[in-house]
Image: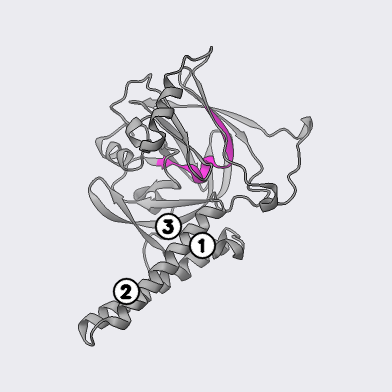
Amino acid sequence: MGWTQKTARWLVVFAVLAATLPVSAEIYRWVDASGKMHFTQDLAKVPMRYRADSKARADAPKADSPVQHYTPSLPPASLSGRRKQPDAAEKMKTHHIRVQRAGASMRVMVRINGELDVPFIIDTGATDVVLPMSAAKQLGLAVDGPDVRMTTVQTANGLTQAAVLMLDSVVLGSARVETVSSLALPGMDEGLLGLSFFNHFTYSIDTSRGVVSLTENDLAAEGVLRGGRNESRWKLQFQSAYHQISSTESLAKSAPFGRDRVKAEARHEQAVERLRLLEDEADDARVPFRWRN
């Protein structure tokens, strides 16, 4: 399946590598206030406060190789217990995967749930893996109904509903990650391989050779990651759900009797149901209760 205009529209929304950039486009990197590193090939996607520094780093003379590196931020040892220092025999495995150019973006084939090979665009600007709705249906995954949590996503064509899924496995080359948070979106021909996969690795991208190198980390084994998300990401999900319940409850109580109150109460019930589905999702990923506050 080739590069399509439809996929390009989604890439704009998810802050991935812009197709209008030349093949030799720089990778712009920045570290946000929480210490988390991001990168993109679209300078416009870099927050204004970090843009000048990010551009200066990208424009700086390179050494011998145009290799770009990324290491996930590690939490303090107190958050994950005593961090063991690996000896030489315990070094994490490194995987080298060839990528195909799609404009200035990088395209790879990914095996989902050990069953279906799906084309993906590498996108570390996406929090989760984003799966085309058609692929999710081919896999027999539930993408609608009362037991599927839905979330609203802003796209280039407006707001749309995405199904929240927990994939059994995502395999890129020889690199395999299990229990991966994802979204299923309609209107996509190719998926977006986001941070719920890449957070399991320290990775580098050699743009001249077209190779992505992934070195396994132990963040999942140490309990720092659950379903590819860290503590702050899960807390944000639950805080949003609690806020929706509180706000819809207030609106229901203040709504006048009649049709308006019925609608408001229905929205509140939907918010409560979304929290239940989020709890189920967290249970599947073995998320600690302290991350759900």
Q: Is residue 91 left or right of residue 262?
A: right
- What residue would you read off at disc 2? 267
Helix, strand or loop status at disc 1: helix
Amino acid type of the residue tagged 3 in the rendering: Val
Instruction: Work out whether mark 2 precedes mark 1 in sequence or the reverse, and give the earlier one.
Output: 2
Q: Nearer the viewer, residue 67 or 144?
A: 67
Amino acid type of the residue tagged 1 in the rendering: Glu
The image position of residue 196, as x and y in percent, is 51, 46
Image point (56%, 54%), residue name: 231
Q: Is residue 195 magenta?
A: yes
Amino acid type of the residue tagged 2 in the rendering: Arg
The image position of residue 149, as x and y in percent, is 41, 63
Image point (38%, 57%), residue name: 163
Q: Range of the magenta residues?
A: 192-204
- What residue would you read off at disc 1? 281
Q: Nearer the viewer, residue 267 or 189?
A: 267
Q: Which mark is residue 164?
A: 3
The image position of residue 144, as x and y in percent, is 36, 63
